Amino acid sequence: MEVQKKILVTGAAGFIGFYVSKKLAEAGHKVLGLDNINAYYDVNLKYARLAELGIERAAAELWNTPTVSDKYPALRFVRMNLEDRDEMPKLFKAEKFDSVIHLGAQAGVRYSIENPETYIDSNIVGFLTILEGCRHNPVEHLVYASSSSVYGENAKVPFSEEDRVDHPISLYAATKKSNELMAYTYSHLYKIPTTGLRFFTVYGPWGRPDMAPMLFAKAISEDQPIKVFNHGDMSRDFTYIDDIVQGILITLNNPPTAEKEQPFYQLFNIGNGSPVSLMDFIETLEKKLGKTAQKIMMDMQPGDVPRTWADTSALQALGYASTTSVEEGVERFVGWWESSFV
């Protein structure tokens, strides 16, 4: 990434967006991080991530007012709602981005069952403003977050980009499938190069507190029981954050071209490619924390799936490799957890 570019990163106060913004800033790119800092989970964690990027909380709290990092001179942050149909077009027009990495969205499978409106606003309307911004202010490449949840209860493993994904079992998954369809339409009509990344379970330091690693680490550390769904008969393609960031940046530098089978549009799985059983993951966490978890075995939750497993061969062809073992990744995560919360 020798050529300096101007890149919009949405979801910059989120888990993955924080790391991507940091990596791009360290490489010398001009980065504008955008986030609405909603209260889906503790905003203090989001502000702490921004502080790591050199963005002071008082400045970050202001709406629609870009502020410059005191750590990375080429990094700025703006608090803005993706679905803001007045401010988002102004932002695109004023900034003239070279590329967009769209990671901002309302996350969470279970939350979507109780708060469906939030998902339509952020994930559908919000994605439309991104597409419209790229349409009226052409970019070299739009990379956006999809999700492994689009595969639903797919029985064939590993999950391939060629598999049918017509049966989402949560509204969250439906919005991500919708994003892929919307991106295809805009790529077809307006020749916008778009790449969707179907993320598999991402974990690591600074991770989301509603995800299993953080929930488990907190409960085990405090001698509280953990809930083990589907009676432990689950597996996940746990992928360490550094591998995910590497994959995003490789993708950014490989936009789809008119010569490909589907001009200007592509989709990739981005995961570890080696699923781990939930019980094995818990055991690794117990070992690193030096404590045994009290387990409450429970039935499967609505909208959840028993297993995920990514076929990453298409992304590997571009140079991607997920090299962090669960053992190593959990050790790094626990080191951060204990230095931050224990």
Image (cartoon, rainbow, N blue to C red):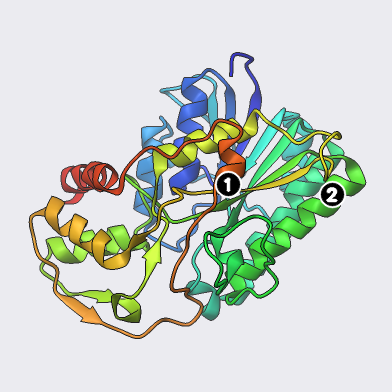
Q: Residue at x 35, y 51 (%)?
A: 44
- Residues 235 and 25: in front is 235
| Kind of element beneath mark 1 | loop
- Of pointers 1 and 2, the one earlier in the residue sequence: 1
Quarter the N terminus occupies = top right
Q: Residue furthest bottom?
A: 299
Name the spot of residue 264 as percent of width and height, x first: 81, 40
Name the spot of residue 35 as percent of width and height, x first: 55, 47
- Residues 232 and 253: in front is 232
Q: Residue furthest right?
A: 189
Residue that numbered label 1 is attached to: 63
Above/below status of 16 relative to 158: above
Name the spot of residue 193 as percent of width and height, x first: 78, 38
The amino acid type found where label 1 is placed reads Trp
Query: Is residue 19 left or right of 116 when viewed as pictured?
Result: left
Above/below status of 227 relative to 220: below
Residue that numbered label 2 is attached to: 186
Name the spot of residue 317 as percent of width and height, x first: 60, 35
